[in-house]
Image (cartoon, rainbow, N blue to C red):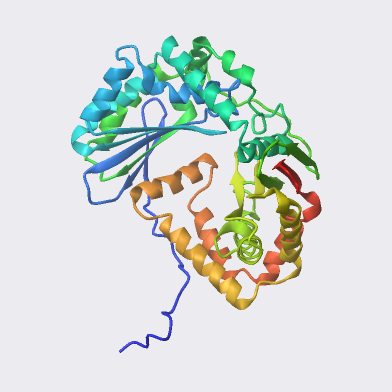
Amino acid sequence: MPDRKKPPKTELITSIPFINPTGARLPNGLPIYFMEGGTEDFLKVEMVFFAGSYQQFQPLVAYATANLIRSGSRHKNREEIHELLDFYSAHLQLDAQKDITSVSMFVLNKHLEPALDLMAELIRDPLFPEEELLAFLKNQKQLHLINQKKVQHLARTCFNELVYGESHPYGYKLKVEDFDQVNRDQLLAFHHHWYRPENAFCIVSGKLPDHITQAMAHRFGDDSWLGQDKPVSPFYKMLSTGSRKVHLEVPGAVQSAVRIGKQLVNRTHPSFHKLKITNALFGGYFGSRLMQNIRQDKGFTYGIGSNLVSLLKSGYFFISTQVGTVVTHEAIKEIYKELVALRTVPASDDELETLKNYLSGSFLRSFDGPFAQSERLKELLVFGLDQRHYEDYLTTLKTIKAEEIMLTAADYLHEDSMMEVVAGGQG
């Protein structure tokens, strides 16, 4: 009989249950990756374009282009498109980010052919109807005005501007007049320039039918989709790093949103894995030092955390929380206290073991199923990495010592290098 008083033995994972993708290149050069997995006759087709807000020449154009893809094509209006999606039991997912835009379709294998026809039509020949654009911009403008009253939104947008500068696409803060300066011709031009096979890759995951390569080539592999030249991303100068602080007074606010952080490296940097582990100890999970201090011990907030964000041209670290205005000053003081402790107080054996077990399990869950694995593959492809990136992370997680975490914090997360935004009050 097992001893119920003893917890089960835990071990860190040592290998990645990665589905090795098979690659192909369609006749027009579009790279396509297949990830076979799952037991249900269901798959995901994701087309990824390097066409985010970094590439746009006018605020909102990239976001509007992506979100209006399903609002009408040369041959179908919005209602017809949505009726077909319902009929095929297909789900179209659109995601416009800073560096990329992805168009994904989840569909049953038995509806693959007609669903791919629809997906190809929407990606390659969208109409961007004027009335749909005006309605979209009106709704987004109203949402923007509502968000201007939320301390969390104000802190986030001001922080990005502080870190990257008001003219950089990573830091640009939307203005209400931006919503009145977007027109249909801009969307058509942006789509024509960036939504091209030479500026994209495709991942197909799930239970793959035998004819999947031919089906994809038939819809996405012809030369008529090619542009004259491969699109080249613009160059923007970033602000220099350094400590800067901003307080945005919000009349009547009962809470303050706090965001502290700095410009940092992205996932291609040799120190990224150590930084990821260091961040997790500091504020990256529920058992982190920030949570134990600011939430559990002090009771200043329901939640606080820190994170690393990887962008193609850069990366940044941030701490985020919302606290009552009367304890804002004390909460910020405790955050900086924990930053000092991160490089001066080593993690105990129990603390390090708990952290490693959590990160090991979380990493394993992120590979659960072919769709999750397609997300991991997408990360690698966007940043030009291979599977060794994940293998190196596991090696680092297994071998890292408390002293290495302290040194990493000293090198990259010194409190004197942080930028700080408070939206609300400071007590």
Q: Is residue 58 above or below residue 297?
A: above
- Identify whether 402 is placed above or below 69: below
Residue drawn at x 61%, y 36% is 150
User: Furthest residue to the left?
Assistant: 110
Q: Is residue 18 left or right of residue 118?
A: right
Task: Report x, y in % for residue 288.
Answer: 60, 63
Q: Position of residue 27 (x, y in %)?
A: 36, 27
Give the x, y percent position of residue 362: 47, 60
Quarter holding residue 366:
bottom left
**Where residue 332 sits in the image (x, y, percent)?**
74, 54
Instruction: Tell me if I can see residue 400 in this picture.
Output: yes
Foreground of the two, 305 or 383: 305
Vertical order, 57 against 413 (above or below): above
Residue 75 lies, with reference to residue 55, above or below; the image says above
Q: Is residue 230 visible?
A: no
Nearer-the-camera pick, 111 or 3? 3
The residue located at (34%, 49%) in the rendering is 370
Residue at the (49%, 22%) spot, across then down: 139
> Residue 69 is drawn in which quadrant?
top left
Q: In the picture, which quadrant includes the N terminus?
A: bottom left
Q: Quadrant of residue 196?
A: top left
Q: Residue furthest front?
A: 252
